Image (cartoon, rainbow, N blue to C red):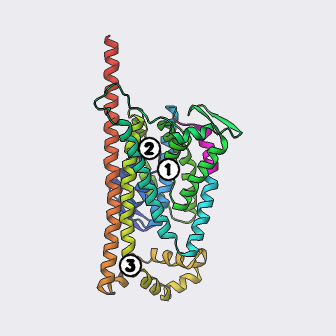
Amino acid sequence: MDIPLLGTIYLPISGVEIMAWKLILLGFCVGVIGGFFGVGGAFMVTPALNVFGFPMAYAIGTDMAHIAGKSIVATAKHRKYGNVDMRLGLLMIVGTAIGIEGGANFIMWLEKVGRVDIVVRYTYMVLLFGLSSFMLYEYFKLTKGTSTDKSKPVSDAGTSTLALKMQSLKIPPMIHLKVSGFHISMWVVLIVSAFTGFLAGFLGVGGGFIRMPSLMYVIGCPTRVAVGTDLFEIVVTGAYGAFSYAMKGRVELIAATVMLIGAAVGAQFGTLATQYVKGLKIRLYFATTMLLAGVSVIFKHIAGTYKKVYSSDLNAWVKANPDFLEYVKTEGAKVSSLKAQVAEWLLFHKAEAQAWIAQQSDVIVHARAMEKAWNAYAGYLMLGAAVGLSILIIMKMIAGIKLEKKLLAEKVVV
């Protein structure tokens, strides 16, 4: 298939048409951010793809495939700079895998009791706002007075009190993490990674935004090592997630490949930028990004309140639709629950659903319009944040390179 670099491309699996440059730009920006923060960027990519017209399941699956490829590039670059603790990363993968299974099973239980949406959404908001608030507090506390007192260096936050306590637990077997620079009990690493894996499986995200802070504040890794090591783990978890979604037919390989073109370049910039930006600044930018992501989740929550106005009527119409009944007899058997069957059918019958909504009362039509609007606000917020933040990171990288060259020239002159 001919794929024009900047023109419109048709994605046959999801039936979406999109300008290729949009995917390349999104991939580039999230590549920069992922290489800089050590996260997959699902909290940015998924809502942005949704705004571009991707159904949510395809947005998540395509993002997973793109993340796996991008993280390989970024991890290789971070390892070159000595920012990847392989021993720690491998242990984290083991604990994460165990935790993800526990989180997924918990989601199954929440679905049975009918509380999954509200519990996941509020947990997500608490984590995003909690992490961002703490990291912003830490930054302003550590930098207070440094603008006037130039003798007080500000480079990284150092080891937290909690991390020092974790490292002091002498529960065998103890392992030496040479890259991170300390000894720690293997059980601490496994328990911490299992807990972050549980949250990732529970929230349905890659978990980088949880794991990176846990590496810094609970285990005690320096910021750059936390970034590189988290990316190494994302290579494995992202690949597994991409494989899982691909088996369900929810990965647009063309879109993921086009995004990866931009991401492969962006990851190089983001990774290089970590060499010129102080660890504490990286934490500040990360906290700001989490704060914006939290606002985006609030927008999605508002959209959900409008969806509740018509969702029960829409579901009743679907269940009584002859086409849906025929689908249940044939393809529906592959889907686990009636709720999932309805969602699956609606995914491929958007035109019929839109026609049904158009024939309903003004209240339902308005609710649907407001739901789409607030979902768009959430997507555009994260898309704008991705573009703006990637520009800032690249500017910092360029300034660092210029300063390095200037200092080197002065040294040669002397």
The reply to whether residue 27 is in sight is no
Residue visible at 44% across and 44% down? 37
- In front of the other: 318 or 150: 150
Residue 88 covered by magenta stretch:
yes
Q: CB under 8 Å between callouts 2 and 3?
A: no
Magenta range: 83-95
Is 313 one of the magenta-colored residues?
no
Which residue is denoted by mark 2 in the rendering? 37
Q: Are marks 1 and 2 in contact (CB under 8 Å)?
A: yes
Q: Where does residue 14 sit, x and y in percent of width and height?
A: 45, 67
Which residue matches tag 3?
Answer: 351
Numbered tag placed on residue 126 in the rendering: none
Tag 1: residue type? Gly
Q: Quadrant of residue 172?
A: top right
> Mark on residue 208?
1
**Image quadrant occupied by the C terminus:** top left
> Marks 2/3: CA distance?
40 Å
264, 35: nearer the viewer: 35
Q: Secondary structure at mark 3?
A: helix
Q: Give the CA separation, mark 1 to mark 2.
A: 9 Å
